[in-house]
């Protein structure tokens, strides 16, 4: 059984509007599951949320849906409760559990929505803001004095091969440097 305190004329069937629902869950015996998984708590840094609510469970038949947010359990606000405290209240409920849940697509805002001023606008560097070596590399593909040698920021330039069993190991350092400078070995 549930009643609604809808905001913005929300309908209970999963509308994008927000609404508060007073839900009363009733089960036949204490061994029967309520039919939802609880996530969240102050100690976990998450708002309480109902997860995995089957439609034919006690919670599902009472009107709860997956991703509903918990506001109250047995008349007590959950915002300052740890996960274990909320779980304890649910276990102590006996065969009747009353909850207030909030439903809607836009209940918990993202960090960018909650704190829009903290989002820094990333500056796209113009050529004038880029360092000299970056501008030259983008324009020419190599630095001055590095024509046809490739570019490396660490150590001597090395020739790379993708071939398995490459014969490059049979050449000496002098021959490899000559290849790098001229492009061919005579």
Image (cartoon, grey):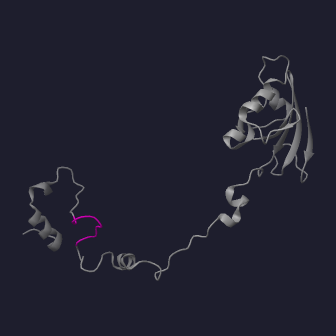
What number of labels is visible? Answer: 0
The image shows residue 13, relative to residue 31, as above or below, that is below
* Span colored in magenta: 149-157
Q: Residue 28 in the image: x percent, y percent?
A: 85, 18
Q: Is residue 151 magenta?
A: yes
Q: Is residue 111 left or right of residue 131?
A: right
Q: Quadrant of residue 158?
A: bottom left
Q: Main secondary structure of the magenta part?
A: loop
The image shows residue 59, relative to residue 138, as above or below, that is above
Which quarter of the figure is the C terminus placed in? bottom left
The image shows residue 80, relative to residue 152, as above or below, that is above
User: Which residue is the extreme one toward the left?
Assistant: 186
The image shows residue 9, relative to residue 51, as above or below, that is below
- Could you tell me which residue is drawn at 81 percent across and 35 percent down? 64
Q: Is residue 110 magenta?
A: no
Q: Quadrant of residue 119?
A: bottom right
Q: Is residue 76 left or right of residue 146?
A: right
**Does residue 61 show up?**
yes
Which quarter of the figure is the N terminus placed in? top right
- Could you tell me which residue is drawn at 36 percent across and 77 percent down? 133
- Could you tell me which residue is drawn at 24 percent across and 77 percent down? 147
Q: Foreground residue, 155 or 186?
A: 155
Q: Residue 106 in the image: x percent, y percent?
A: 77, 52
Q: Is residue 81 left or right of residue 183?
A: right
**Does residue 38 show up?**
no
Q: Residue 109 in the image: x percent, y percent?
A: 73, 54
Q: Foreground residue, 164 or 74?
A: 74
User: Which residue is the extreme one toward the bottom?
Assistant: 128
Q: Residue 45 in the image: x percent, y percent?
A: 68, 44
């Amino acid at each position: 059984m549930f009643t609604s305190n809808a905001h913005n004329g929300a309908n209970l069937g999963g509308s994008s509007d927000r609404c508060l629902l007073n839900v009363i869950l009733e089960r036949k015996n204490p061994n029967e599951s309520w039919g939802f998984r609880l996530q969240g708590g102050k100690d976990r840094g998450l708002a309480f949320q109902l997860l995995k609510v089957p439609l034919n469970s006690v919670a599902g038949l009472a009107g709860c849906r997956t991703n509903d947010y918990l506001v109250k359990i047995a008349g007590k606000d959950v915002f300052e409760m740890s996960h274990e405290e909320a779980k304890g209240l649910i276990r102590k409920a006996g065969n009747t559990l009353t909850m207030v849940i909030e439903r809607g697509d836009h209940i918990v805002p993202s960090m960018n929505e909650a704190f829009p001023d903290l989002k820094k606008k990333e500056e796209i560097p113009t050529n004038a803001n880029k360092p000299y070596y970056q501008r030259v590399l983008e324009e020419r593909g190599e630095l001055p004095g590095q024509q046809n040698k490739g570019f490396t920021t660490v150590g001597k330039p090395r020739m790379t091969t993708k071939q398995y069993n490459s014969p490059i190991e049979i050449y000496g350092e002098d021959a490899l440097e000559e290849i790098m400078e001229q492009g061919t070995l005579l």
